[in-house]
Amino acid sequence: MDLNVQIFTGTCKNPADLEAGRVVDKLRRILERTKITSGFIGWNVDTDVSEIAALLRDSDADVYLWLPIFSELDVLAEFSPIIGSKNTEVINDRGDDETFNFCCPANPGNVDRAIDIFEKYYSDDIYDGVFIDRIRFPSFFGGKDMVFSCFCEYCRSKYDVPDPSELAALDGENPLGITRYKDLRYEMSGVYQKLFDYKSEAVTRSLERLCDYFRKRGLKIGLDLFAPFLSPFVGQDYRRLLPLADIVKPMFYKATNAPAGLPFEIGAYAAAFDDDREKADRRKALFAGIVGYDDADFVSCEISGIKKIIEDNKLKTKLYAGIELNYTDVSPVTQEYIGRSVTNAQSADGIVTSWDLNTTPDSHIDYLLDIWEQF
Ligand SMILES: [Zn+2]
């Protein structure tokens, strides 16, 4: 398996508490024992990453700029917002450093804005590729109004979006009417199918434009994606996105209590429809049962589903499972967890030590390297 690393340098607003020398030491710790295939670094604009990038390049690793697109860049420019079913902007800003506030991913003006920002702040020649993140609609984090969108003028004129009045929860315990999850696809109520089909069409079209732009600049493409079972709800269709990328990283974050974390997102879905805790628990249990979340082989089934698409379509896209290694308040990762995660991911082409080498304890790195020889 290939080993890839991810390094968080901070948001557009605030640099992370990061010393390049400390990260370089951690990279050397890995390079003494194994090869690094690529490193994804981002996205604070002021952090000097030249020393880190130089070490990766000297060791023959590809260096990717980790760049969020439809969220976080609104600190640097004005983007067209998402409009909810009540015809008002849906804003998700809890005052945290990372807001997870999203602009409309369908709007071509927002793609242009992201490209302008890339050219103004990030287009150094130290990068071999871009690792694109936040290429999606918002998830249930922030409530159902985040997901029952976007009704902006552009979306209503270009896409067949459902009428807001149709988007009422169907059933307290199974509000989207989901009956089956198979081959990375859901069977669900027609109106929600229509909503999520529009979202995946919109994200795919925007992504095609973005990837075309980056390819013309000679850059490789990596995509940071929700795990397959969560991806339809945010407009990420693996069948359509895999052909665009050199690398995809599905985030299999089972220990993360933040967006993209699997239990976090399941909990957000369950809590999004009303304030009834007991109902939310039943909703969660029903959903987990349908997707098989509690099965021991759940993550390996998700990986097999992605691999099947890659093989059936004879794609060269590499599948690198995103596994948390950092130890933070929201991701209390243990060595036992790392061992289990790597074992579950062994049918992938490799892993990405997510999402921040800087806050990964040396003992976690050593543990990974100790078990790595088996894979
Ligand atoms: Zn829109």
Image (spheres, rainbow, N blue to C red):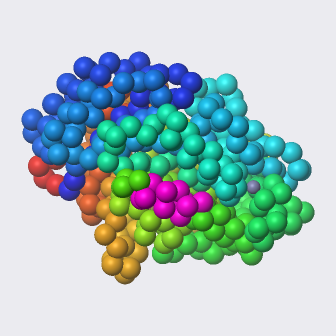
Q: Residue at x 69, y 51 (%)?
A: 109
Q: Quadrant of the C terminus?
A: bottom left
| Residue 208 located within the stretch drawn in magenta | yes
| Residue 137 located within the stretch drawn in magenta | no
Q: How many marks?
A: 0
Q: Residue at x 57, y 43 (%)?
A: 116
**Residue 191 coordinates in the image, percent (x, y):** 77, 71
Res 40 seen here? no
Residues in magenta, as a range? 206-216
Q: Residue at x 55, y 47 (%)?
A: 115
**Residue 277 coordinates in the image, percent (x, y):** 72, 43
**Residue 279 coordinates in the image, percent (x, y):** 73, 51
SS assignment for the magenta stretch, majority? helix
Give 313 or 341, whichever is nearer the viewer.
313
Q: Residue at x 63, y 30 (%)?
A: 75
Left or right, residue 148 beside residue 139: right
- The image quarter containing residue 303 is bottom left
Give 40 or 274, whichever is nearer the viewer.
40
Q: Quadrant of the N terminus?
A: bottom left
Left or right, residue 73 beside residue 151: left
Task: Answer above or below: position of 114 versus 291.
Answer: above
Res 88 seen here? yes
Give 106 or 353, whichever is nearer the viewer.
106
Give 9 or 125, whichever is nearer the viewer.
125
Left or right, residue 374 beside residue 183: left
Q: Quadrant of ligand 1?
A: bottom right
Task: Answer above or below: position of 154 versus 313.
Answer: above
Task: Answer above or below: position of 19 versus 26.
Answer: above
**Residue 260 coordinates in the image, percent (x, y):** 52, 46
